[in-house]
Amino acid sequence: MFILGLAVLSITGGSFAANVVPSSIDQPGTQPQEVGNLESPNKCDNCHGGYNTATEPAFNWRGSMMANAGRDPIFWATLAIAEQDFDGAGDLCIRCHSTAGWLAGRSTPTDGSGLAAGDADGVECDFCHKMTDPSNTDPVLKGIMKEPFVANDPLSGEPFYGSGMSSLWAGSEKLGPYSDADARHQFMENDFIRSVDFCGTCHDVSNSAVGNLAHNYGAQSEFLATESVVADGLPDDSPKNYASKASFNNPPYKYGVVERTFSEYKAGLISKTPVGEFVNLPADLKSGALKAIYDAATDYGTKDANYEDGDVRYYSCQTCHMRPIFGQGCNKNPPFRSDLPLHDMTGGNYWMPEAIKYLDGLSKLRLGGGLNDTQMAALDAGILRAKEQLNLAATLVVDYNSSTVKIVNHTGHKLISGYPEGRRMWIKTTWMDDGGKILRVDGDYGEIGVIVNGVNVRSIKNLGDPNTKIYEAHYGIDQQWAAQLVELGYPNNLALSYDRNSGDVKQNLGELALSPAGTEFETFHFVLNNVVHKDNRIPPYGMDYETARKRNALPVPADQYGGGPGKQYDYYDTVALNPPSGATNAVIELLYQPTSWEYIQFLDLANNQPVGSFLENEGKYMLEAWLNTGMAEPYVMASATWGNAQVCDVPIPTLQAATPGSTEVTSNWTTVAAEGYNLFYDQSGKAQLVANVGASTTFTDTGLTNGQEYCYKVTAYAGTCESGFSNIICAIPNQPGQANTEATLSTGRYETSGKGKTQVKTFIETTSFAVGDQVIVRSKVLDETTGLPIPNATVTVDISGPESTTVVTGPSGSDGIAEATWSTQAANRKGNGGTTPGSYVATTTDVSAAGYDWDGIESTIQLTLQ
């Protein structure tokens, strides 16, 4: 048996914040105050924001939960419980939720009371753009990691990816993926920022306290069957001694399971698959997120999937959550790139931005209040991107004959993933007869008969419904660990769970300690949890049992989804439906809820912070926000029908034009049978709402930045039904300025090869023609300032020589190419008439493009007729 020592004594003594982080909580990596040149995101915004919300890094990052991790009220409410459970554990949370605050040494006291207002920005720009590989294999870019805080194994060299154990560059340079950046600051190319391991820095989360102190190290039983963890199980030392602490001797995936998103990804085949091999994936995976990534990387199959510089682009966290987009990285007129990473960074949390805005309006945010209009708009845009991410995560396939529905996981991790507490996904099936009468609803969601603060609480009505499958991970405490905790001073009456209707304590620590050996109780006390009690989330494609076992990422029980030793798990789940008598049709919906009533209730009831303490009200404020912002209303990720049920069927409009002007673009589209239309910016398949335009079929988007490209798409809606997206048209607003043909006038002819469906027309460039030929005159119209092609431009070309004529091109395409045809005439049978042979010169005499003036520079080309 071991003794927790100071950690427990501080709990029982009523302290809820440590001024010195315990050695069981400390972890390797760059330490506080070792890197002193981290700059505020507000400074980064000066160049990387304010010019194109659809593509710029600043606006999109500010709409993500990464940018708001320090504001997140769930973080603060959970931190309050963590500090009650293990004094000093808050340092684990602050390390990832406020990177600048932690690195500046403001994580103590560990209740977060030392953080500054600017620390609310969460995972900041410089954190990612200073990060190096903790393996230290890069010959130049080596972050600061001083002994004993080196985050890799000294013998094998295996890097410690996880729990925020970052290795940060101490130089003044910003680190990024490009070698040719045109930046106002110093920069260096960093290959690690594209690595499939980069995001593992924070997205495997391990509890070093349980990892060091619990009898099973917080690891899964299958892992412990053959693997070992180096941990001393001893109290925190003074002076500190890290020689045998879990976090200093083991990679994070070995102990203290909290979140294993990165390990789930590493255990699957997606992490090893280049995006260009999308075509070789199983047929039922060729949609959703994996297809969206492929489409973005290849511009819908028109180019190579790899990065512009030739680096292989793998299916990684970055390619999914930062998909490539065409645009500029800053507002100082750098080159346009086709693989600019969209700083999207949204997962599936569409609700938390609403909670943040609500509490900000009441001045109840614990940190980072006083949001400005740009931040509010960014959060709204992030909500839409998060919902789109969920729509891409899964598909449903219904087999009417067998009455089954197949749920396919299109992500690179379990479905659902991330920090699992309070998150769940389930199937809701509404059964109807021929007349549309509802016979039964499986997985129904609604009021459960609980009123809190005058509000009727909504949740899944029957958590035990045999016709409802709920996908979730539940953690807990086992009997042996509970007995040790009680012996070490934790109170017997420590509530582990509450009745969701009455709020009464269902189970406490003392009951568990006295239960038979092997008993486990589910609980939301994440800093005390030492077992994964249940995990039936759907594995990713090709998840290997052995790799998942070694990384403590197995389903629980481990034999689900066809898995087991020597096997790969299925990336889908086939669920049997149970139609009631008389049912002829059904609507089947896959629902996701990011924060459940049961979790919110726990965070409120379990908070016993002293009156006047820093975290006293965080559970109460979180409850208030949840009740008043829709209760994290479940979102429909995917839907399908069984039988002849009617589904949402609003026609998709066709976007006809996007016409640029100075600081504006006017879009118009076809009329369809609908109540109204939504206009969006396209973001490489994702979308940012421009406006709900009502029943109008035209809209002028104003206040734009001249010289930036804006790509549009539109949907139609009727009631709650919305169509899919239309085609995309891009435009570049500009001041009346210079439309430049860049001397690209050319001539040629079209030649046809093949027959029928295989027939292909190819443009052959030439300046030599026979009398009677169709001479194709081409001009490429470019913006003189940006070098970008100008669509919908027309060019007037004078042709002079033995004869003279004028031709006018049709509108240029998205590539800026405009074409005209000069139809020469052959002589008649007697040799009379026809176009005179000889040498001719084609000259541009005018260029017409909305929002532009031609620069007047003529382009010419000589051609001959024989």
Image (cartoon, rainbow, N blue to C red):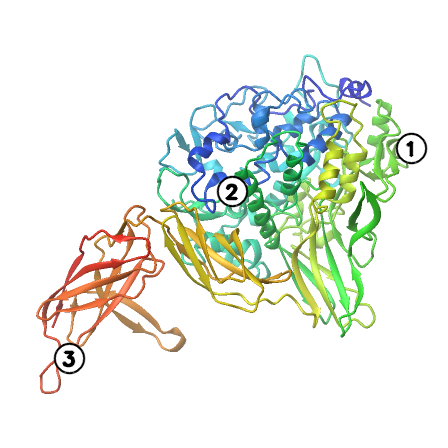
Density class for disc 2 (Cα within 10 Å; few <14, some 14-19, many ≥20) is many
Callout 3 secondary element: loop
Q: What residue type is labelled 3?
A: Ala
- What is the three-letter code of the residue carrying label 2? Asn
How far apart marks 3 and 1 lie (CA) works out to 104 Å
Above/below status of 190 relative to 430: above
User: CB atoms at circles 1 and 2 under 8 Å apart?
Assistant: no
Q: Residue at x 70, y 48 (%)?
A: 565
Mark earlier in primary sequence (2, 3): 2
> Toward which corner of the image does residue 809 lie, by quadrant?
bottom left
Which numbered circle lies on residue 60? 2
| Residue 152 visible | no
Quadrant occupied by the C terminus: bottom left
Picture quarter with the N terminus: top right
- Element at badge 1? loop
Residue under pointer 3: 826
Front residue (pair 705, 132): 705
Position of 361 compared to 137: left or right?
A: right
Tell me the distance, in whole angstroms, between the alpha carbons under discs 2 and 3: 60 Å
Between 450 and 3, the residue placed more toward the observer is 450
Q: Where is residue 295 in the image (x, y as percent from the top left)?
A: 48, 56
Q: How crowded is mark 1: few (under 14 residues within 10 Å), some or many (20 or more)?
A: few
The location of residue 838, given as percent across then percent down, is 9, 70
